[in-house]
Image: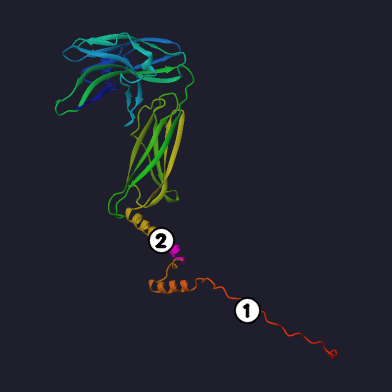
Amino acid sequence: MRKLYVLILSVFLLALTTPAAYAADNGSWSVYPVSTQIAARPYFYLSADPGQTLRDKVTVANKTGGPQTFRLYAADAYNTARDGGFAVRTVKEKQLGVGAWAHPARSRVTVPAHGSVTVPFTLRVPEKAEPGDHPGALVALDERLESGDAATSSVAVQRAVGARIYLRVGGPTVPALAVEKVRISHHQPLVPGLGESGATVSYTLHNTGNVTLNPKVRLRAEGLFGRTLLSRGLTKIPSELLPGQRVRLTEPWHGAPQLDWGHVTLTASAPGTRESASTSFVALPWLMTVLAGAGIAAAVVVVIRARRGGTRPWPLGARRGGTRRWWLRARRGRARPSVPVRPSRPVRTTPSRRRSSPSARP
């Protein structure tokens, strides 16, 4: 059986106690920037102009009782589609930003048991690099494949740990955020009042600018006549939305109305930008929906049959007992084609005689 290879990457596990605990860590090894004279750094925060070259150092620490060998490489970062989390490209994927610009001095490093190794790296920003934020990471990958029972498991795992890189290239910065493809789906009981109702609001959050954003999203729902049904800030959103990234998110709405007509509005904001998008909804219980659909279908069938028969359907409110008589009257009143009639012979008129004397006039 062909195995499915999965890469487990830790790039955001930050503790708050000792300087070494600022590292991204998976329990077996950690990766972190070399501490400066001022303080330990939780990640690389770098700034450069197009064409500039930066040099820094990264430390890989081994927490196990035996030596470990890692593949060291730079990678671009992105937001995951599932929840918008911070993630980086694998070593086999094409790199376009930091992953292509940063180069460790060693591509493979062996770290002794309970020891650490510091590796310098160079980051060369291209002359035509776009201004703004270019996130990425320096990743220490264990290229060994871990799997369970070979006879039952079809998944092999590779583990990796990465230290984040936040690079800002000099130039104009444009914060911009968009809310796209707002949808709402209702979950109604079959019979009104017998069961709970709810809805799910889905939307896409899109960073259309060139800087990393920390977005906030507020959901507001209004019913018929402008009644406020819901107004709250959302919490299940990415803490960082990277430039150019889209994330599809959903928000449950418990206790949504079973019978109403209105719209929902999502407003996303971040420093320097604010955008909204909305969509309308009609909440209708399943039973009423089925009955309304059946009524419409019956009306359509009656109209079609009436048109095929050349008559109009009976008036609304007419009793079924008088239906037959109405149809008979309608059919009798239909125009019948005329039969051609043979023209009659012309009648000869009697010639008038000339009067002998004029008639007396009073």
Circle 2 residue: 299
Question: Mark 1 or 2, which is nearer the eye?
Answer: 1
Q: Quadrant of the N terminus?
A: top left
At horizontal 25% and vertical 23% (from top left) the residue drawn is: 8
Mark on residue 344?
A: 1
What colour scheme has been applied to the protein in the rendered image?
Answer: rainbow
Instruction: Please give the label number shown on residue 162.
Output: none
Residue at horizontal 40%, vertical 20%?
A: 134
Residue at the location (44% across, 73% down)?
Answer: 328
Q: What x and y, as percent, mark residue 284?
A: 36, 52
User: Which contiguous range is marked in magenta?
Assistant: 298-311
In the foreground, 319 or 151 = 151
Q: Is tag 1's residue or tag 2's residue first in the polypeptide sequence?
A: 2
Verify CB contact (< 8 Å) between mark 1 and mark 2.
Answer: no
Q: How far is disc 1 from disc 2 in space, using C-alphas? A: 53 Å
**Residue type pointed to by label 1:** Ser
Neighbour class for label 2 at 10 Å: few (<14), some, many (≥20)? few
As drawn, 334 above or below 199:
below
Amino acid type indicated by mark 2: Ala
Q: Quadrant of residue 298?
A: bottom left
> Does residue 95 appear in this view?
yes
Q: Looking at the image, is 2 positioned above or below residue 32?
A: below
Q: For numbered disc 2, what is the local secondary structure?
A: helix
Q: For the C terminus, give its image quadrant.
A: bottom right
Residue shown at 42%/70% (left/top)? Answer: 318
> Foreground: 22 or 349?
349
Based on the picture, tell me whether residue 288 belongs to the magenta stretch: no
Position in image of residue 179 (x %, y %): 42, 35
Q: Which SS does the magenta portion mostly show?
A: helix
Residue 129 location, quadrant:
top left
- Determine the image quadrant of residue 305: bottom left
Q: Position of residue 306 (x, y in %)?
A: 44, 64
